[in-house]
Amino acid sequence: MYLLLNSNKLNTNNIIIKYNKIKNEYSLLYSILYGKMNGIFIQILYTYSKQINNYNYIFISNRNIIKLFKKIQTNIQKTIPSFILLREKNYQYFIITKSQIPDKSNNIINISIKKIIWLHQNYIPIISII
């Protein structure tokens, strides 16, 4: 069972980052009134997706979602300076995942971000589609 967070009411100050020295990775927790969730679960609206070399690029044009991802990225960069969540190319914003995107006509997906790993000289999030 997953608890999806409303993207309009997500408080980035409730994100807790824990470091695992053995695996050289970070875990994300989200603090809520009655406990802590293992990861951040968000429902997003995307414009389109494209698969390139086993990676799915999810392009986002919704300004609220872009603003939310920038807030999350800025908050996490206070602890992990080389963290990248939202990428930009030619004025298009996108996130990258290895998860398969379900065929849906409404372009709404639920994502979870639980871990941040070191890869290609940056800390990147492991984004899963649930």
Image (spheres, rainbow, N blue to C red):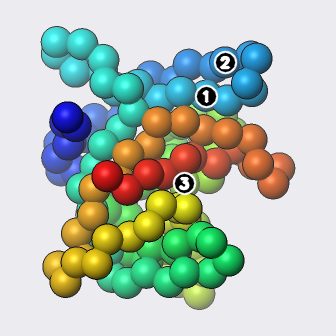
- The relative height of residue 37 versus residue 73 in the rendered view (above or below) is above
- Please tell me which residue is depicted at 22% across the width and 37% down the height of the picture: 2
How far apart, in angstroms, are the residues tagged by discs 1 and 3?
A: 14 Å
Quadrant of the drawing holding the N terminus: top left
Residue 85, numbered circle: 3
Disc 1 vs disc 3: which is toward the camera? 1
**Helix, strand or loop at disc 3?**
loop
Q: Earlier in the sequence, mark 1 or mark 2?
A: 2
Tag 3: amino acid: Leu
Q: Amino acid at mark 1?
A: Tyr
- Looking at the rendered image, the disc whose residue lies closer to the viewer, 2 or 3, is 2
Query: Which residue is at a point 55% across and 47% down the rendered structure image?
Result: 126
Instruction: Name the N-terminal-most of marks 1 and 3.
Output: 1
Q: Residue at x 43, y 81 (%)?
A: 49
**Location of residue 20 with respect to 95 vertically, above or below:** above
Q: CA distance from mark 2 to mark 3?
A: 20 Å
Which of 44 and 77 lies nearest the eye of the viewer? Answer: 44
Identify which residue is drawn at 30% across, 17% down.
36
Q: Is the residue under label 2 in contact with that under label 1 (CB below 8 Å)?
A: yes
| Circle on res. 26 | 1
Distance from disc 1 to disc 2, alpha carbons, whole Å, reads 6 Å
* Residue with the mark numbered 2: 20
Label 2 vs 3, first from the N-terminus: 2
